[in-house]
Image (cartoon, rainbow, N blue to C red):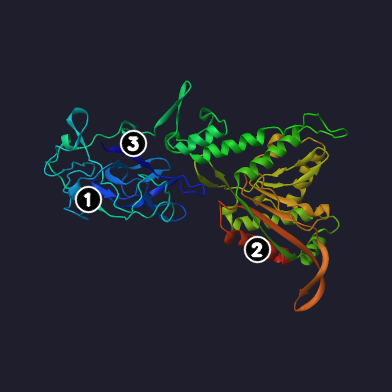
Amino acid sequence: MAEVREFTLPDLGEGLTEAVIVQWLVEVGDVVAVDQPVVEVETAKAMVEVPCPYGGVVTARFGEEGAEVPVGAPLVTVAVGAVPDDLAGEEGGTPCAWGSPQSSAVESGGGVDSAVAGPGGSTTAPAPAPPEAGEPQDSGSGNVLVGYGTSSSSARRRRIRPGAPEGPAHRPPAPASLAAAAGPAPTEANGTRTVAVISPLVRRIAREHGLDLRDVRGTGREGLILRTDVESEVRARAAREPVAVAAAGPVPGEERIPLKGLRGAAAEKFRRSRHEIPDATCWVDADATELLAARRAMNVPGAPKVSLLALLARICTAALARYPELNATVDTAAQEIVRLPAVHLGFAAQTDRGLVVPVVRDAQDRTVEQLSAEIARLTDAARAGKLSPAELSHGTFTLNNYGVFGVDGSTPILNHPEAAMLGVGRIAAKPWVHEGELAVRQVVQLSFTFDHRVCDGGTAGGFLRYVADCVERPALLLRGR
């Protein structure tokens, strides 16, 4: 008796959670060998042919060409068993004239007498022929991608000849587990509620880590729990668990500082940033001699004081006007990049209570003198511990001047959920080729960290190069946007 087995879209690796069906390589009624490709799919990385680990007769296909299929969803069902003798020695056979791609009536000899009777008089396909001499005896290989796993079986494509008029009585009943394949994702009972989970691999990973699937929020279609959801929850749980302390107790003389209050909030933000954001950093050295000269020229007696940080802030707003895709955030729930209309510029400020990031609202509309005044006001409030929550939140871009600590460079952690941060090192006298001559110039290292989801390296490099050009030639700011 034929055994109907379900083959689902396997885990394709690299965090991929779905694929698009490009082309079916088999039809209902075809005989497939172990590891024969049955469908070509396209992922975010490449197009691949997916081999079926079972040999037998294809009894059903799931999904039309162009449809998106999540990992763990059924692709085909295969009747694994013995193929009738009259087909065992032929390759190809008479084409099948099905009225529906889901039908799979077969004949053995000359009728449907040898078909396996199903409920209500329906029939299922007889199983495929036993392997020929020298072929593997296993009915499944565990293969995931072409080129891996069992590959010695010949990939023959043969079709079972119809032996009776088409009709519902000659179509195989779908297994109960596949009855709702085209509808909502199957669920697994767990306690008092059900959780949407298809993949046995997902259940195994959760079981190995003692994870209750009821505590996991699925990000797949209709709340389907994917492998990435379980792995993210495992990592998050590991981060929340306290470090184990030796049974002998605390080490004499050690000091423990609670991660709470401002320090705890900053630590959580750093952790979340590194956990969620795929960041990258690029950097460049720039000649800041002209920038320092411009600042001295602006700070004449009686004029409003202009700080170096304010000049850098003005350069940032000009650069963001040219590269607005960097003034953005990522909505992970909706899987969308959100570009923001206003630049709310944060700047890192070290205080006795810890690191804070005050925010200058609508920085793009302020002159350099206004930026300098607002930065000074927020800095004083930060050191006095009098910043309001509104003055510490909803920034869209951060400027980090770590040069005040006497260091040249750094790879900053992004201020979650912002997508970019400019870092500025100390300005120091260094040998520099200026106008074709070696000279001593005031050189600064600029670093730029960005969320690689919102842009590619070309955009980030263009932003940083424009900032460096403005540092070297501040007159570029007079050109406007």
Using the image as rendered, state which of residue 371 and residue 134 is in the foreground.
134
Q: Position of residue 113 (x, y in %)?
A: 14, 37
Give SS at disc 1: helix
From the image, tell me which residue sits under label 2: 466
Snapshot quadrant of residue 480? bottom right
Quick one: quadrant of the N terminus? top left
> How far from the left and from the top, in percent, is residue 302?
84, 55
User: SS for tag 3?
Assistant: loop
For numbered disc 2, what is the local secondary structure?
helix
Give whichever of discs 1 and 3 has the lower sequence position.
1
Q: Which residue is painted at 31% across and 31% down in the image?
A: 176
Instruction: Give the alpha-carbon distance from disc 2 to disc 1, as whole Å.
Output: 70 Å
- Is residue 425 among the parts visible in the rendering? yes
User: Which residue sits at x=88%, y=34%?
Assistant: 253
Hey, which residue is sitting farthest right in the picture? 253
Residue 66 versus residue 322 in the image, above or below: above
x and y percent of residue 81 in the render? 28, 41
Q: Which residue is mark 1?
A: 88
Q: Amino acid at mark 3?
A: Ala
Kindly identify the residue that appears in the image at 48 percent across and 47 percent down: 16
Circle 2: is it few (<14), some (14-19), or many (20+) Cα within 10 Å? some
Inspect the image, locate mark 1, and give the three-letter code of the amino acid beneath it.
Ala
Residue at mark 3: 181
**Marks 2 and 3, the one that precedes in the sequence:** 3
Q: Give the Cα separation between the discs numbered 2 and 3.
A: 53 Å
Mark 1 vs mark 3, foreground winner is: 1
Taking the spot 51% from the left edge, 49% from the top edge, the residue there is 14
Q: CA distance from mark 1 to mark 3?
A: 32 Å
